[in-house]
Image (tube, coloured by chain):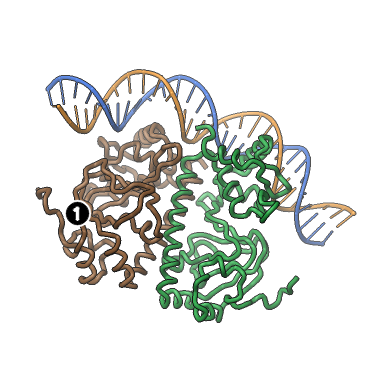
Chain colours: A green, B brown, C orange, D blue
Amino acid sequence: MSTKKNIRIPCTLCPGKEHSLFSELPKDDLDALSQHKTCIRYKKGQTLFYEGTRPMGLFCINSGKVKVYKISSEGKEQILKLAKSGDFLGYRALISEEFYNSSATVIEEGAMCYIPKSDFLEILHKNPAFFRKMAKRVAHELGLMEQKLVTIAQKSVRERLAATLIMLKETYGMEGEESDLIDIALSREDLANIIGTATETVIRLLSDFKSQKLISLQGKKIKVLNHKGLIREADFYGR
Amino acid sequence: MSTKKNIRIPCTLCPGKEHSLFSELPKDDLDALSQHKTCIRYKKGQTLFYEGTRPMGLFCINSGKVKVYKISSEGKEQILKLAKSGDFLGYRALISEEFYNSSATVIEEGAMCYIPKSDFLEILHKNPAFFRKMAKRVAHELGLMEQKLVTIAQKSVRERLAATLIMLKETYGMEGEESDLIDIALSREDLANIIGTATETVIRLLSDFKSQKLISLQGKKIKVLNHKGLIREADFYGR
DNA sequence: TTCAAAAAGTGATGAATGTCATTTTTTACG
DNA sequence: CGTAAAAAATGACATTCATCACTTTTTGAA
């Protein structure tokens, strides 16, 4: 295992780079971004940024997993998205020139890089191709968010749970043999906060799915036993 | 009244221009956009574009009102936003280089301009300040959509209806004396499709609000009698 | 290893809201 | 106008799901 010291490697050598928005950036630009970045290990439960505060830079997830969420006026958490290695956080607020409208907290320990706002904006405005790529990404995410809205507005909790499990399997399924195991340690409460329901309801529905042999529960992690069955639950149940 | 012919005026002279994303565009660019645009009157019920089709240009609403919505797999409509004079439609898909992910249908007759994709993209890529402004807008809308998601996921239907009425009053309230009258002809069904509920539920809650003297119903249009009361309903009811 | 705290799970209950069936009112068109 | 069709309204009923109260299991830190 590596030591905790000196986890700061150049962006050019970052393993997550290839799949990230930085993938096609020229070396010069990447070096410029690397220059003033800081990289810190975050433990589970630590928060990267809070809703309502001013963004001062861009987070890049080197390793680990993060939940991005809003707290409603009643104090309930709604998870907007999950982020993993290679993902960026905070660019929406930087581009819209607003405060953060969500918070981000680590759910699986890992290393996060932080690129100062000025460096990021400089590259953004200097490199039109990169700006287009970022704009394209934000526009794409708006489309995703619209789809999520429709799902929450119109599907039952049961359907949403099934759909969420499918999505999680696609995003966090292991490689090869164990591809049915959803490799992310979400608490039942987190799962409920993705779906927009009560923790107890998630627990009940999960054991329902389990007794239907759609999934199996291995401690915290969930294994998908019947993918097609889950898809059926997600699309049609009860309506 | 003007005739139906020749409703095509230059963008430079468009009354909605001042409040639109085009407000700070140099005259040259505006003229370029004007060049190949077409302007057509649309009647209530006519559709500007359909979900799943390829965008070939940008719509600009000269007058009238439009609903933008998605149809869920069960065939139910979910309204994502309402658009009025000066608003643009279709730029998300143009920027993300995707098909439309929503449909747009006229709910109040009016004139719509249509700027070919190539002209719009040319200005967008020629004028970095304008591109930034568009990107900023999309990022801002992503923030709004995230907020809507939380509202739908966590607030009761009653709260959402109250919140929607407040929003409608702010956006479509008349000038001066009659500022409490919500000047948009939404059917109960449309209102239900904004909120994400059944038409009957909206009808019942509206008459509830009416008997509480929060609103009055003047045919299709709604008048807000007790703004603070509605805000209270929107924030706290029942939780 | 132990023990307290957190998370998961279970059961009972009621309120909110969806659905269906029907009536009344409004709209729009010939 | 008159009439058919659409929209609004109302009632009865079924269902989902949130809530609360509690038990069991797991976790993690001393």
Residue with the mark numbered 1 = B39
- Look at the numbered disc 1 and give the secondary structure of its residue: strand
Can you say whether B214 is above or below B151 in the image? Answer: above
Disc 1: CA contacts within 10 A as few (<14), some (14-19) or many (>=20): some
Percent x, y for residue A218? 73, 47
Residue B52, compared with residue B132, is above or below; it is above
The quadrant in which the N terminus of chain A is found is: bottom right
Report the front residue among A235 and A95: A235
Q: Amino acid at mark 1?
A: Cys
Instruction: Report if residue B230 is visible in the image.
Output: no
Query: Residue A184: x and y, percent?
Result: 65, 54
Left or right of B173 on screen, residue C2: right
Q: In terms of depth relative to the viewer, which is nearer, B214 or B76? A: B76
Q: Residue at x 59, y 52 (%)?
A: A170
Residue B197 placement: quadrant: top left
Q: Residue at x 43, y 45 (%)?
A: B234
